[in-house]
Image: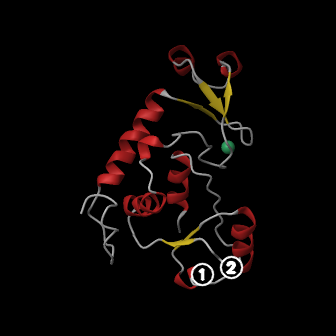
């Protein structure tokens, strides 16, 4: 249910594992062992005592969900290491030389971009340029979107009313 949120948290550079149909016990154990915060829409899961760090996501809109997470971390999105993780598999991206990606990116991209990163797990190549600009623009829109159906107001200092 929170797959899109997970992708955006990765774009923002958060170490974000996502599991679709995981058993609660397994999830709780993994969160504790790896020191993770569980993000879930499942109220019962949040109430489990073994799970020390959990955040109940209440918003139905993606923008609202991202804001809920940022309200807890207290971070400004512009301070985050943007596009430092693979959106698909969460691995930390590694710098690669331009020559190394010559045959793996479109010619136009190769001609116009100087810096590339790649995912050590899936091999996906990332570059700044329009990619980054589009995502930043989309993020800005997401975070300013207030037309959502939350049943609770966000914390007083977490953004626009
Ligand atoms: Zn990857």
Q: What residue is shown at x 68% (from left), y 80% (from top)? A: 50
Q: What residue is shown at x 46% (from left), y 63% (from top)? A: 72
Q: What residue is shown at x 34% (from left), y 46% (from top)? A: 140
Which residue is more in the foreground, 80 or 113? 80
Direction from residue 123 to residue 114 in the image, left or right: left
Q: Where is residue 25 in the image (x, y as percent from the top left)?
A: 73, 79
Direction from residue 8 to residue 26 in the image, left or right: right
Which residue is more in the foreground, 35 or 82? 35
Binning the other alpha carbons within 10 Å of mark 2 as few (below 14), some (14 to 19) or many (20 upward) gives few
CA–CA distance in space, label 2 to label 1: 7 Å
Residue with the mark numbered 2: 24
Residue with the mark numbered 1: 45
Q: Are marks 2 and 1 in contact (CB under 8 Å)?
A: yes
Q: Where is residue 148 in the image (x, y as percent from the top left)?
A: 30, 67
For label 2, the SS is: helix
- Sooner in the amino-acid sequence: mark 2 or mark 1: 2
Look at the picture and state if 157 lies above or below 110: below
For label 1, the SS is: helix
Ligand 1's quadrant: top right
Seen as rendered, the residue at the extreme left is 161
Binning the other alpha carbons within 10 Å of mark 1 as few (below 14), some (14 to 19) or many (20 upward) gives many
Q: Where is residue 125 in the image (x, y as percent from the top left)?
A: 63, 32
Q: Mark on residue 146?
A: none
Q: What residue is shown at x 65% (from left), y 58% (from top)? A: 17
């Amino acid at each position: 249910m929170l797959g899109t949120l997970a992708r955006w948290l990765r774009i923002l550079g958060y170490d974000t594992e996502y599991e679709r149909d995981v058993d609660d016990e397994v999830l709780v154990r993994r969160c504790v062992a790896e020191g993770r915060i569980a993000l879930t829409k499942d109220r019962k899961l949040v109430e489990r005592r073994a799970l020390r760090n959990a955040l109940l996501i209440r918003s139905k809109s993606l923008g609202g969900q991202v804001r809920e997470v940022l309200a807890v971390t207290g971070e400004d999105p512009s301070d985050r290491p943007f596009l430092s993780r693979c959106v698909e598999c969460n691995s930390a991206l590694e710098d690669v030389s331009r020559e190394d990606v010559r045959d793996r990116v479109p010619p136009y991209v190769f001609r116009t971009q100087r810096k590339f990163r790649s995912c050590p797990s899936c091999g996906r190549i990332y570059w700044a340029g329009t990619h980054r600009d589009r995502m930043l623009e989309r993020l800005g829109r997401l975070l300013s979107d207030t037309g959502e159906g939350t049943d609770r107001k966000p914390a007083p200092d977490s953004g626009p009313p």
